[in-house]
Image (spheres, grey):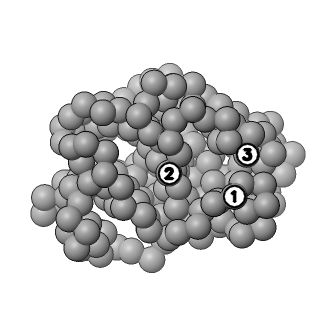
Amino acid sequence: MKIGIISDSHGSSKALERVFGLFGDADCIIHAGDILYHPPRLYGYEGYDVIKCVELINGLRVPFVSVRGNCDSEVYTELMPGYAERETTVLGVHPCKIVVNHGTRLNTAAMVSLAKDCGADIFVSGHTHIPVLEKRDGVTLINPGSIGIPRYPSSGPVPTASLIDGGHISVFDIWTGRVFLEDEL
């Protein structure tokens, strides 16, 4: 089982292209929301291209599972049918059961509770743009950080993503591969 996990791309085609290349042999890719829309201050920045993002996502050869983030808009559904339809989704990727929610309105306790209510081992979120990898009450919490508008680490933000490969989970810099967080399932 190999699962690529990203969040908060905010229309960064350059970052999406990079992670999709890194996750080329994944069994699926999970996006925890804030897929296409980016704040007005980012218009004109190199690598921000909503149409190219849509083309990249639609061209994937592996399942792409996404949830709606607080910046996702229904106006994009004409470009991508099924775009961010749900706030929460639950999926089984043997041997795990995973809950995905952007996390806008959920604190850690609520994430753990929702995962347990769904019988899940893993809860994937985004929203904060800061990576998290921790275990709470039998649930592994994963926030891959942001590939589009990073806020981690404070010494100089770098875009981060997460990978579940077998029983190993890592959060890493998408450009250098430097691992910031890692654990076993």
Callout 1 amino acid: Pro
Quick one: label 3, few (<14), some, or many (20+) residues within 10 Å? some
- Label 3 or label 1, whichever lies nearer to me, is 1
Q: In which quarter of the image is residue 138?
A: bottom left
Report the residue at 64% width, 59% height from top: 83
> Residue 137 at what x, y percent from top left?
13, 63
Q: Which residue bears the numbered disc 3?
A: 54
Q: Which residue bears the numbered disc 1?
A: 81
Q: How far apart are marks 3 and 2 (CA)?
A: 14 Å
Report the residue at 70% width, 68% height from top: 73
> Residue 63 at what x, y percent from top left?
50, 42
> Which numbered disc flags the more N-terminal residue, 2 or 1?
2
> Residue 103 at what x, y percent from top left?
44, 67
Q: Which residue bears the numbered disc 2?
A: 65
Q: In which quarter of the image is residue 183?
A: top left
Q: How far apart are marks 2 and 1 (CA)?
A: 13 Å
Quick one: label 1, few (<14), some, or many (20+) residues within 10 Å? few
- Image height of 169 relative to 144, above or below: above
Foreground: 65 or 164?
65
- Image height of 31 relative to 13, above or below: below
Q: In which quarter of the image is residue 76?
A: bottom right
> Which SS class for mark 3?
helix
> Which SS class for mark 2?
strand
Q: Is residue 136 shown to the viewer in this render? A: yes
Circles 3 and 2, Cβ within 8 Å, touching? The answer is no
- Left or right: 182 as drawn, with respect to 144: left
